[in-house]
């Protein structure tokens, strides 16, 4: 079902034994490494997404925010949430670059229709900024407004971010390698915007540090669609886009600098249900990791013969996060950020280490 990925299996690793899924049908654990149950022990403001931590610790370059999102809003709202700045504040929340309409211009690149060509229209610009401030005040985000205003003007006066989103500036042969987008939303999931894998690569080249994206819909059971016909339809598209991204990173010499993680919030039942499909199964799930200078070409962990229980090398979600931070050069034992109560917060729980098989 994944012949293209099979040909480059030396360039990625599979984690086959992630065991601590909370079983919630949302993105929270995939974006933060934490569970919703841990919210009770979170600092005021909540746990930040991975990209928010990286934005705070490593910063942004002018005109290209560190933390970007290509996640489409979905009918099931929680499938399209890229996480937030948490206690780090809204300045480190992801900048959303896509809208409900997949053909729409990227969001947040203009202030209510103000483009660089109209920047000399000072009165309109002032009105746009004032409206932006009022909306942010209503959302309780005024604390981040100086950051937002500066960021918006940097984007307007620079071309890097806008150019990264423009695939007409990419080699057509590379674009073709990724496959063709399907703009149709998949029921309550996301559209099949497969070329966003390429957009993500271009954004990272432009200076972004973390880019998240969602792709299609994978909840196939019962009235949600049959598992086997759906997989035969979806797998070839994902196979093409993901293999193109991994190959592209290697060809450009980015495989040591850019990490890729592909996963979902839980696994699927080892036994077929009455609808010839598979239900939710939080007791074991998997992830694919590539790049980041990791030791790839291996499968880590194992389940029993039916894929129902972990039998060796149990792995936590947070261990994958620790690995990604490690790949970015962040010292997990020394790096902390002070929360609103004055308490230093580590990026992962103190007992969590990067996955040794991947980082040596």
Image (spheres, rainbow, N blue to C red):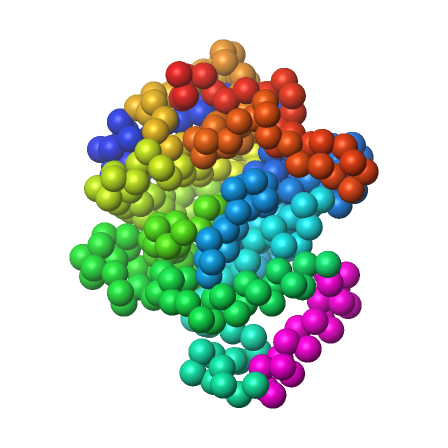
Left or right of 138 in this view: 180: left
x and y, in percent, of residue 114 in the image: 52, 80
Residue 243 part of the magenta-drawn span? no
Q: Give the range drawn in magenta.
A: 123-142
Q: Residue at x 46, y 61 (%)?
A: 63
Which residue occupies 59% across, 30% down?
335
Q: Percent position (x, y) of residue 300? A: 42, 19
Q: Quadrant of residue 102?
A: bottom left
- Residue 161 is situated, as x and y percent measured from the top left of the image, at 41, 62
Work out which residue is located at the far left of the displayed protein and give it.
173
Above or below 315: residue 135: below
Instruction: Tell me which secondary structure the magenta stretch mostly adopts.
Output: helix
Quarter of the figure that contains the N terminus: top left
Q: In this view, does 236 lie to the left or right of 83?
A: left
Foreground pick, 138 / 196: 138
Q: Which residue is depicted at the point 44% across and 38% down?
A: 262
Question: Could you tell whether 324 is left or right of 53 in the image?
Answer: left
Q: Can residue 247 be seen in this view?
A: no
- Residue at image x 65%, y 63%? 146
> Is-magenta flag for residue 127?
yes
Q: Give the total number of marks visible in the rendering.
A: 0
Drawn side of residue 10 relative to residue 335, left or right: left
Q: Can residue 169 be seen in this view?
A: yes
**Toward the viewer: 112 or 274?**
112
Residue 131: give x, y in percent of width and height: 68, 77
Q: The C terminus is located in which quarter?
A: top left
Q: Which of 250 and 197 is in front in this view?
A: 250
Instruction: Decide which of 222, 293 is in the foreground and name it.
Output: 293
């Amino acid at each position: 079902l994944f012949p293209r990925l099979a040909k480059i299996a030396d360039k990625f690793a599979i984690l086959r034994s992630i065991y601590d899924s909370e079983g919630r049908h949302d993105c929270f654990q995939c974006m933060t490494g934490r569970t919703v149950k841990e919210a009770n022990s979170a600092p005021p403001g909540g746990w930040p997404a991975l990209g928010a931590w990286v934005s705070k610790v490593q910063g942004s370059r002018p005109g290209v925010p560190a933390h970007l999102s290509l996640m489409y809003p979905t009918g099931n709202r929680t499938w399209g949430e890229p996480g937030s700045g948490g206690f780090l504040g809204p300045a480190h929340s992801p900048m959303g670059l896509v809208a409900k309409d997949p053909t729409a211009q990227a969001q947040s690149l203009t202030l209510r229709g103000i483009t660089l060509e109209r920047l000399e229209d000072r009165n309109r610009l002032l009105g746009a900024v004032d409206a932006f401030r009022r909306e942010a005040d209503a959302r309780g985000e005024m604390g981040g407004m100086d950051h937002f205003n500066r960021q918006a003007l940097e984007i307007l006066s620079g071309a890097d971010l806008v150019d990264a989103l423009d695939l007409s500036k990419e080699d057509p042969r590379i674009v073709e390698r990724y496959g063709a987008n399907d703009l149709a939303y998949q029921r309550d999931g996301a559209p099949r915007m497969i070329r966003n894998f390429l957009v993500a690569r271009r954004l990272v080249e432009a200076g972004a540090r973390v880019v998240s994206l969602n792709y299609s819909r994978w909840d196939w059971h019962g009235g949600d669609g049959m598992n086997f016909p759906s997989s035969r339809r979806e797998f070839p598209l994902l196979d093409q886009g993901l293999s193109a991204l991994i190959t592209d990173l290697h060809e450009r010499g980015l495989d040591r600098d850019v990490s890729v993680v592909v996963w979902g919030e839980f696994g699927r039942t080892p036994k077929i249900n009455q609808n010839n499909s598979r239900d939710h199964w939080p007791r074991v799930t998997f992830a694919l990791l590539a790049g980041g200078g990791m030791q790839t070409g291996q499968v880590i962990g194992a389940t029993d013969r039916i894929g129902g229980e972990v039998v060796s090398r149990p792995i936590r979600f947070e261990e994958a996060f620790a690995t990604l931070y490690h790949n970015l050069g962040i010292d997990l034992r020394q790096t902390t950020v002070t929360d609103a109560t004055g308490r230093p917060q580590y990026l992962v729980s103190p007992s969590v280490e990067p996955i040794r098989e991947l980082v040596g």
